[in-house]
Every structure is written in structure tokens, then in C-alpha cells.
Image (tube, rainbow, N blue to C red):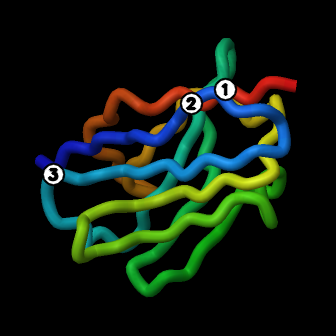
Amino acid sequence: QVQLVESGGGLVQAGGSLRLSCAASGSIASINAMGWYRQAPGKQRELVATITSEGSTDYKYSVKGRFTISRDNAKNTVYLQMNSLKPEDTAVYYCNKASNWIRWGQGTQVTVSS
């Protein structure tokens, strides 16, 4: 089964940027839709952004215009460019399929200070 490894998180001030990467151990070319999720302390995991194999994207309303999801099938990697970060974006970020999830990776911590 494909394994997912997220990276690129860190501590950033409000208004800053981060670029997250999700490297898959196998091919993602056949996976129709990939997504980025996040889980804040005490809250449920939520879907933040999705991208289809054709490149169509969709975003949670609160991140539209600030986050950009992309994928490189040749590198088996999905990215999340996050700009204009806000304290409420603080969470552990994960990638996975948009449905029929496979095993979750360890995630990457994003902390935005005010």
C-alpha cells in the first residue's frame, strides 16, 4: 500500500507562508483526487483542499485565495502552498486520498503565531 510522508511545516508569524509537501512511496497517478487535511487541537480532522488527476481544485472556504494545492505525478508528490497564514490555520496537516483513505502519515505541524 502507498505510504504518505508529509513535510514542510513549522512556526511562522501571521501573514507568513509555508509550502507543505506530501511524498508518496508509490504512484499517485492513478489516484483521481488527493487532498490536504488538517486537525487542530480538540477538533476533528477537516478537508482543506483537493486536486483531481486533471488538475481541478477545490478549497475550504476559509482558505480560498490563500492556499494553493498542486500535484506532480512524476514525483508522486502533492503540495500545499499556504500564504497569508492566520493563527486559526494552526494544526497538524495531513495528505490523503479525497475518499477511501489509505493509511494516514504522521502529518506535519503548522503553528502560526499572532
Question: What residue lies at 54% left-to-right and 56% top-to-bottom?
Answer: 80
Query: What residue is disc 2 on?
Result: 10
From this viewpoint, which residue is outermost toward the bottom? 54
Checking the image for residue 25, the label placed there is 3
Where residue 22 appears, x then y in whole percent? Answer: 37, 50
Where residue 78 appears, x then y in whole percent? Answer: 40, 61
Look at the image and tell me in which quarter the C terminus lies. Answer: top right
Callout 2 touching callout 1 (CB < 8 Å) = yes
Q: Is residue 36 left or right of residue 12?
A: left
Q: Quadrant of residue 31?
A: bottom left
Task: Tell me the element at label 1.
Answer: strand
Image height of 39 relative to 41, above or below: below
Q: CA distance from mark 1 to mark 3?
A: 27 Å
Question: What residue lies at 41% left-to-right and 70% top-to-bottom?
Answer: 71
Where residue 86 appears, x then y in whole percent? Answer: 83, 38
Image height of 102 relative to 58, above or below: above
Query: What residue is disc 1 on?
Result: 111
